[in-house]
Image (spheres, rainbow, N blue to C red):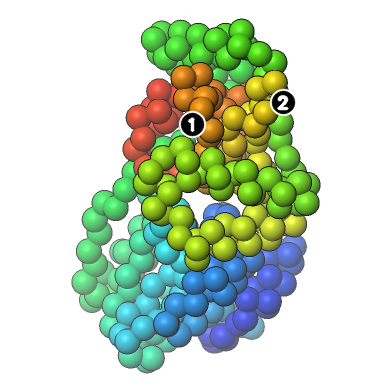
Amino acid sequence: MSYTITQETFDSLASFWSDPKLHFKWNLVFILPAWLKLWWQEFKPSTDLYLGAVRRQGEIIGIAPLQLKDNTASFIGSLDVCDYLDFVIAPGAESDFFRVLLDDLNQKGIKQLNLSSLRPESTVLTRLADIARSGGYEVVCKPEDVSVELDLPSTFDEYLEILDTKQRHEVKRKLRKLAETGKIEFRILEDGAAIHKGMDVFLKMFTESRSDKASFLTSQKESFFRSLADTMSELKLLRMGVLELDTRPTAMILYFDYNGGAYLYNSGYDPDYTGLSVGLVSKVLCIQECINRGMRKFDFLKGNDVYKYHLGCKEVT
């Protein structure tokens, strides 16, 4: 059986993503062709682009979205803005894919793979690690961070029952306190123009709600976030949640709607409303909205922030 690797472009990857005849799925929003292209254009890394498509008898069985520097290959993306990274492989083709990929990288002088931002079920951990070991490669795996997520029940009342007694009481109390203060409304923006306009307020809340977020948001990252909002909303994958009190925005959420789940990417709130816990309440109301939409999972992505556990999340293992 013959195997080849072709070097693709971001645009050709985009055509693969939209091709229903291909037998592999892009399971992570952070490795979609549009995301990869945007990250590359915005951050302009001093690395060589490697978009390898492994083909068996001419048919694509997987994509390796990598960047090469010196003798090291790593995923396209960065830890600070890309929570999960992985290869894209047709089910059952992992062994062939990795064997061909490792041979090709070795021929190009690559001596090390530095692969980060992995979920426990990533192909790197479930397949590549064993394949590499059996091929005589040294494999080192170490924890990088934790990810937490919530399996969504069918109703909001069922969700509240998931919480322990103390946290259920706190959530209800905070919702009641906010409702007693004024008229509350939680809106989901899906239109690209509305999201584009809302980014000014969102980024203001993002930087004002926490000092670490203010220092994180460099001009380059702000440009990335704005472009990301435009690009992903155009693909109908990005949502913006807005919590209003008497028509005034008090907290906002950016999340992705992908593969039946919600992925909480970033959030912010107006510090004038800290006493009303609008940051936490906005997330509770976003969970409620996602349940009403029939979503199966609410992924809080990386980070062991205490509030995530208070909202019923469990660590991904």
Q: Residue furthest front?
A: 272
In this picture, is 287 found above or below 57? Answer: above
Q: How many marks?
A: 2
Judged left or right of residue 171, residue 238 is right
10 Å crowding of disc 2: few (<14), some (14-19), many (20+):
few
Classify mark 1: helix, strand or loop. Answer: helix
Residue at 37% x, 77% y: name it: 73
The residue beneath circle 1 is: 271
Relative to 59, does residue 209 appear above or below in the rendering? above
Measured Cα–Cα span from mark 1 to mark 2: 17 Å
Q: Give the secondary structure at mark 2.
A: loop
Q: Nearer the viewer, residue 316 or 70?
A: 70
Considering the image in quadrants, where does the C terminus appear? top left
Q: Please, is residue 16 above or below residue 189 in the view?
A: below
Q: Nearer the viewer, residue 117 or 82?
A: 82
Q: Position of residue 288 (x, y in %)?
A: 62, 24
User: At 50% from the left edge and 9% from the top edge, which residue is drawn?
Assistant: 173
Mark 1 or 2, nearer chain start: 2
- Quadrant, the N terminus: bottom right
Q: Nearer the viewer, residue 137 or 152?
A: 152
Q: For residue 247, which numbered disc appears in the image?
A: 2
